[in-house]
Image: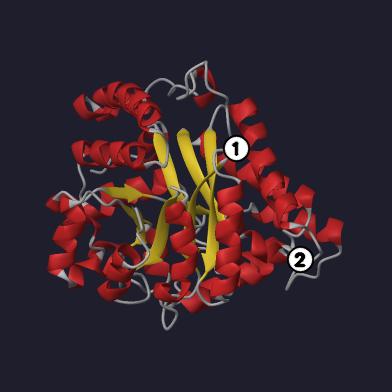
Amino acid sequence: MPLPLSVFEKLPKTDLHVHLDGSLRLKTILELAEEQGVKLPTEDPAELADALVCGKHVGSLEAYLEAFKITLSVLQTREALFRAAYELAEDAARENVRYMEVRYSPMLHRQRGLRLVAVVESVLSGLRQAQEDHGIESNVIICGIRNISPELSLEMARLAVAYKNRGVVAFDLAGAEYDHPAKHHREAFQLIRKNNINCTIHAGEAFGPESIAQALHVCGAHRIGHGCRLREDGDLLHYINDHRVPLEVCPSSNVQTGAVESLESHPLKLYHDLGVRVTINTDNRLITDTSVSRELWLCHAKLGLEPDDIARIVLNGFKSAFLPFHIRHTYLRRVSKELEQFQENPESLLHGEAPRVSDLPSGRTQQEPRSA
């Protein structure tokens, strides 16, 4: 019998691939719409959840992205961005996520005239406040958008450079993958690499392994978002494994968008068994109707991953975080010790409370400033 979800909720975790605009609380969308005078498709929570395709199979990435028109409509003020960021970190802390990297594209939050600096500062402020209140450490990944324009991606890259060491730890390329190759955004990634900033790219989700190769060899990605179709190119698969390039796997989201047919057919177990540095993430907590704990539980219950496998994947998350080496090392030492009990006797976590994030020391030393 599989272990219950409650065991996985007590494990220390990361979430390295989570979109701010896909992870609001349903109640928050309704309240923000009322405050801002935004017209939603419906004011009934159940009907709104349907409109947002929460957890439903939609068959394509493009159909999945349609839901973001609704969430973005209420994320156009400082207050809304602060609240969304704070609540996302609060929700993650409740399931014992210790470290999180929140990604979004500031260009999508200017419909009401907000300046880009105001967008970034609002999100960082929300994450910092959540860290003060709940102990969870969060940083930001700024996204360019494949299907908008390379010029705007370059503008987002400049913004990431401006906020390097101020809460922004990486640059990403998101959006519709098919027919929008990453190489068109090469200039943005040249700027990012020139400034020694981390980068991750959505690739191999709605297009084949050549998209992953382009992300790696043309744009210089340090991590790959999703990578479902990597198994179609064995040589590239071994290259990623040999070079320890982490995969940001989002199992339920991949089923929802049709990137894989079912959870049982997801290649993440193959990748893990081969030794690839697999990390498990939510993608969008609201749109996919999930949590990190649930994703890990599904890997256990549906794919047969044992406690030792889960522990390795959890550690992969901390190894793959865009943090300075000595901070990652501090996290790894502490988390490895906590995971020993889970590996030796998983059922023991059914009893007693897991350490709360706010009760644990920060991954940073006392000499270093806390950052969002």
Mark on residue 90? 1
Q: Residue at x 63, y 26 (%)?
A: 132
Earlier in the chain: of badge 2 and badge 1, it is 2
Q: Position of residue 113 (x, y in %)?
A: 81, 63
Q: Residue at x 35, y 66 (%)?
A: 215
The residue labelled by disc 2 is 43
Mark on residue 5? none
At label 1, the amino acid type is Glu
Q: Position of residue 270 (x, y in %)?
A: 17, 58
Left or right, 170 with reference to 47: left
Q: Out of 97 and 248, give the one closest to the viewer.
A: 248
Q: Out of 61 and 101, give the one closest to the viewer.
A: 101
Q: Residue at x 34, y 68 (%)?
A: 218
Q: Position of residue 311 (x, y in %)?
A: 26, 36
Left or right, 333 with reference to 274: right
At label 2, the amino acid type is Glu
Q: How is the image coloured?
A: secondary structure
